Image (tube, rainbow, N blue to C red):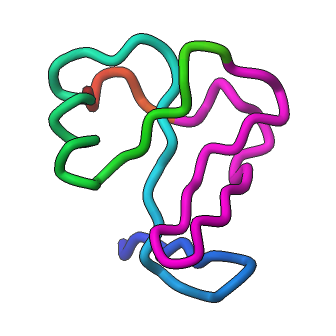
Amino acid sequence: MARKVEKCPKCGSSNVIPIAYGEPGPKIWKEQIEGRIILGGCNIFEDSPNVHCKDCKYEWKKQKHWLAMIKPEKY
């Protein structure tokens, strides 16, 4: 099954990346340096954004529940 491509609600770009929160490990740092993820800091709140548009810099919250943002086993 094909994965649905996320698009920016502001500019329509599909050049979007996830925002990771918490203390990053080596794999997260590497992905941040490569521009595949953005670091959101150590504090996370219910309304914290979890998607970042690389084109217009807009950030928004994709999931309804903020704990479902990133699967830990991926990193």
> What percent of the width, then of the height, locates residue 44?
69, 20
> Camera-side residue: 24 or 73?
24
Residues drawn in magenta: 44-69
Q: Is residue 13 left or right of residue 17?
A: right
Instruction: Please name the predominant secondary structure of the magenta segment in the image.
Output: loop
> Camera-side residue: 50 or 29?
29
Q: Is residue 41 above or below residue 16?
A: above
Q: Is residue 75 magenta?
A: no
Quarter of the image where the N terminus is located: bottom left
> Camera-side residue: 1 or 42?
42
Q: Outermost residue toward the right?
A: 47
> What percent of the width, then of the height, locates residue 14?
48, 81
Q: Is residue 56 above or below residue 22?
A: below
Which residue: 73% across, 77% down? 9
User: In which image quadrant can residue 43 be found?
Assistant: top right
Total residue callouts: 0
> What percent of the width, then of the height, locates residue 24?
34, 18
Which residue: 41% across, 11% down? 23
Which residue: 78% across, 22% down? 45
> What percent of the width, then of the height, locates residue 11?
66, 86
Q: Outermost residue toward the bottom?
A: 12
Q: Is residue 13 left or right of residue 66?
A: left
Quarter of the image where the C terminus is located: top left
Q: Is residue 65 magenta?
A: yes
Which residue: 72% across, 55% down? 60
Q: Is residue 65 left or right of residue 40?
A: right
Q: Is residue 57 above or below residue 7?
A: above
